Image: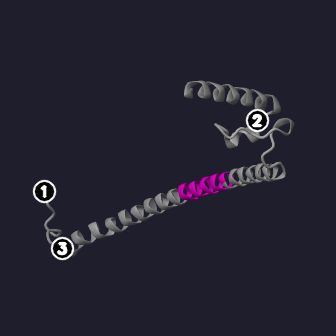
Amino acid sequence: MQRPGLAGSPEKDLCPAMFSFLDQKRQISELRQEVDGLKRSFNALELEWSEMHDRIRRMLAKISRRQQREDEREDAQPGAGENGAPLASVGATDTNTSLTPRQRAWQERILSHRRTLSAKAGE
């Protein structure tokens, strides 16, 4: 049963307004916590990408130095292979500078064999 003095009175309208203020405070607090969590996640991702960028930069610098050393080595011995013999141009690749002397010898034998096979096939 309704109390006779509260129907349509300002006291009745005041109660929801007071509780809505408390509800807004709770919502603001939750939003602040959510924003703080998002900031932490963003900072963690930023750190992770920064570390990845540094790793890639170091790797590219290492590859560049290696390529520069190989270029300098090629400039020091232009056209000369093992025992002063010229390098085979058929099937020669840039990887033969990174081969060991034994691997280069086998590479030269294989290329020589291929040249003789192609010469016989051309006859």
Residue identified by numbered label 2 = 99
Q: Amino acid at mark 3?
A: Ser
Q: Amino acid at mark 1?
A: Met
Q: Which mark sits nearer the N-terminus, 1 or 3? A: 1
CA–CA distance in space, label 2 to label 1: 98 Å
Disc 2 or disc 1, which is closer to the eye? 2
Q: Residue at x 77, y 48 (%)?
A: 70
Is label 1 in a helix, a strand or a loop?
A: loop
What range of the chain is rendered magenta?
Answer: 40-56
| Residue 86, percent from left and from top | 78, 40
| Residue 49, percent from left and from top | 60, 55
Q: Residue 42 colored magenta?
A: yes
Q: Residue at x 81, y 43 (%)?
A: 80
Residue identified by numbered label 1 = 1
Q: Residue 15 colored magenta?
A: no
Is label 2 in a helix, a strand or a loop?
A: loop
Q: Are marks 2 and 1 in contact (CB under 8 Å)?
A: no
Disc 3 or disc 2, which is closer to the eye? 2
Q: How is the image coloured?
A: one colour
Task: Give the answer, above or below, for where 79 lies relative to 26.
Answer: above
Q: Amino acid at mark 2?
A: Leu
Q: Could you tell me what secondary structure mostly forms the magenta stretch?
A: helix
Q: Quadrant of residue 1?
A: bottom left
| Residue 91, percent from left and from top | 64, 37
Q: Which mark sits nearer the N-terminus, 3 or 2? A: 3
Residue identified by numbered label 3 = 9
Disc 1 or disc 3, which is closer to the eye? 3
Q: Residue at x 38, y 65 (%)?
A: 22
Which residue is the extreme one toward the bottom? 10
